[in-house]
Amino acid sequence: MPDSWPLVGRGEVLSTVTRLARTGRRAGVVIVGPPGCGRTRLARAALAAVAGDAEGPTWAPRWLIATSATAPFPLGAVSHLLSGQGADLGENPLFAARRRLVADAGGARLLLAVDDAHWLDGTSAALVQQLAAADEAFVIVTVPSGTPVRDAVFALWKEGLADRLDIGDLERADHDTLLRSALGDHVDEATLRRLWDLSRGNPLFLRELVDAARAAGTLRRVGQVWRWDGPVEPTPRLVELVERQMGRRSPEDLELLTLIAFGEPLGSELLAGTVAPETLTRLEHDGLLSSVQRGRRVDVSLTHPLHAEVLRRQASPWQTRQAFRRLTEALERTGARRGLDRARLLWWREEQGIAAGADDLVSTAEAVLASDRRLATQLARAAIGRSASTATTLRLGRVLVALALADDAERVLAAAMADRDATGHDARAHRALALLRVPNLCWGLHDLRTALRVVDEIDPPTGGDGTGTVEPGVAVLRAYRRLMTGCPVGPDPALESGAHPDPDLLDPDAADHGLAVAALAAALAGDHARALALAERAEAAAPPGRPRSWTGYEARTARWYAHLLDADLPAAEAVAQRLREEALLESAPEPASLAATWLGIVAARRGRLPEAVRWLQEAAAAVRASRFPFTLPLVSEIAVALASLGGLDRARAALAEAEPLGDEVLFSAWTWTARVWLAGLGGRRGEAVRMALDTPARAGRLAVLQSLHAVVRIGEAPPAVVAELDRLAARGTGRLHDLYAAHARAVADADPRALDTAAQAFADRGMLLLAAEAAAQACAAHRAAGRPSSARASAVRARGWAPAAAVTPALALLDGADELTPRETEIASLAAGGLTSRAIASQLVVSVRTVDNVLASVYQKLGITGRAELPDVVGLPTTR
């Protein structure tokens, strides 16, 4: 592996080698590991570590070159170290070479590294063993796993001369660290997972995969994030590497390996009728095949996924079709008895050009959706364009939505609605198509204009839209219209009844549609309690195992949004984390980006600004801005976080990128918050106040609250802002209303005690940046009121809560404030954490009297009477 990539995950091995060399407890080490795991790189690092160990002896490092080319010649691996002196070796070249190497060390101890020791000729192997046995050298030897070696090499660890150190491929965490270190930037989670799945932690494979993907342009940096989007494109170098690992194989072996690559995993009974058992046994022994017991069956797959990828890519169209023909014949012969067998048989026939009907393809795709998304995708896409009934088209649309194939779903549903005469469906069928198509347009493609046209086609606006008794399906479409046009959606029995929109056509699992839309509308209106109740009902109405739908995302969005309204950050984070884990498992980039956006916003609310920026940048790298429904909240939150980190120019540039997207309604007005914050940080406080008061209600309650509170954070709380926050608190539910309103009143009244109370309330909810800002404002208010001790106490709390990198107007109030010395802060924090004076003295290696004297000074500065009041003053970190 090239040295430009760092050595990761081998620290323990390096420490062991260095310790053994320093103490002399062993005469060396033998490093054993599979091909590509980095044995050579590790040996070079170990050679450098031992030679550079200041606590060890003086070393004379030497590197032996053992290859297939040197193996036939006595001392071939050592010849470069004996250059020009071969004629002097005499009748006993082994003894002479040993003496020469020791003499050439010039009094230093010989440090000998031997890479690929299985290629050592017999004389060189004996030389290495003798040098170790005589304690004339410390040897670092590498050997591939499972490879025979000469007796002299085997004797190194058999006779206890050297420790055998077995290494494997990297663990997942080390794999991710290596990749991030090599690329030098943020790598998104989907890319990390995909490279892990293909490389399985093998450093050489990982490097070649990265080089191949970069050469193909599929692995590239998007903004600050590296992302892989595209197929594996094996380079000649990668193909050669795989071929070398597989070894020289007969045409029959390669044909069998290719067959398994196209059909894996394959049951042993299927293969038994196709290939001789001894062939399978031999290939498994060679490490190319792996077998796994699953119940009463044994499945066979290629051991390394990259081998399968390369074999599939190298197969010609004729070879591919022949492989699927053989697989089909073998499965038909043994019988399709497993759950996936019928689906695989259907797909293998498709690959031979034997077309199935749309209904058969869709039914099979539905059956395997939960167990094999790749196969479900192949079957669903094969059904596109084939003659189908309206009911089958609806089922196909649902499967495509569940697979996050929004473009394909729109193509199918749009064609069905446009070709109404050909399909012969009635008005109810037309409405059923629209009920599936509109959420896909809103959430999957963010094409609100087309979505509105579809709604208007089904339910032309007449001015009476929104009240009265209507069929549930129409009520759902009308609710979408109001959401998309920024009109409030109030409680609606037709939405919240949970009634099925069209029981004669849609499956019963669509009963949650109206509930999910109602939940989202309630959340945007600021009614967190009703939103959570409706979201819970919507999720309960969805039967287990149903195909994922945009209705499910609406319910989750409502739940996440409602938790933010209630300042319940752990609950909001849990919703986002669960969605992200599911999306990554399903390789669904848009839902994964939605979850990353939510996680970034939660991190920002906690005050973890760098973490927020990383999450939001990862989300932005994975989607097209014009087609992601949360693009404008995402950009707005990036801008606010960057500005809060002191990057005002970067924040303005980020916000400017959103301008070409226009001002479509769904979440678009979220950018008002960023504009208010940037105006305030730029010194335009009056403009910030005006913009905050002008934030449209269609932005959603969270955005309105954030805009109004932004001006409070910069120290402005005019009566109109305070009155509006009080009005919203009176009309909405969720603790965020009350937190922001109380903070605004405290700033308006310049009430230091109320500001201290607001700070603690924010801290109790885990909103540490806001807690620090309110405490800093309390510090300034205490100073203005002539209470320096209280000011110091507030300042200590503010500094304890403030994120290290944050730069905001409120935190600037701490500049010049009297504060505790670093030693006073350290001792006060330890005492606040419950340590006794004696324990603190022991930990800091000072006297108990010194600790007590420092604490007395702290009490005087902070205006408190003793240790019991320290936790409240110091502001210990919260776990929320």
Image (cartoon, helix red, strand yellow):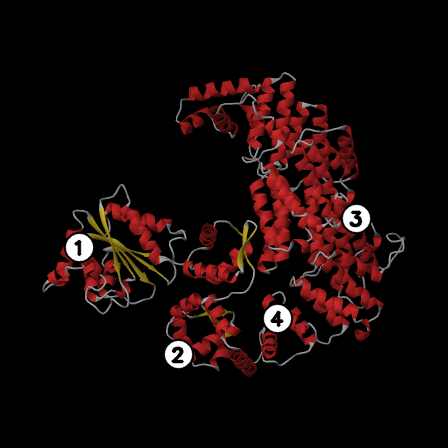
- Real-space Cα distance between discs 1 and 2? 44 Å
Front residue of 223/380: it is 223
Q: Residue at x 49, y 68 (%)?
A: 309
Disc 2 secondary structure class: loop
Q: Residues within 10 Å of mark 2 (few under 14, many from 20)?
A: few
Q: Residues within 10 Å of mark 1 (few under 14, many from 20)?
A: many
**Residue 101 numbered tag:** 1
User: Residue 640 at what x, y percent from top left?
Assistant: 64, 40
Q: Residue at x 70, y 37 (%)?
A: 676
Can you say which quadrant of the picture contains the C terminus?
top right
Type of amino acid at the residue the image marks with label 1: Leu
| 3 vs 4, front mark | 3
Question: Pointer 3: what residue?
Answer: 486
Q: Is residue 464 above or below residue 791?
A: below
**Residue 378 numbered tag:** 4
First-in-chain label (1 vs 3) = 1
Question: Pointer 2: what residue?
Answer: 250
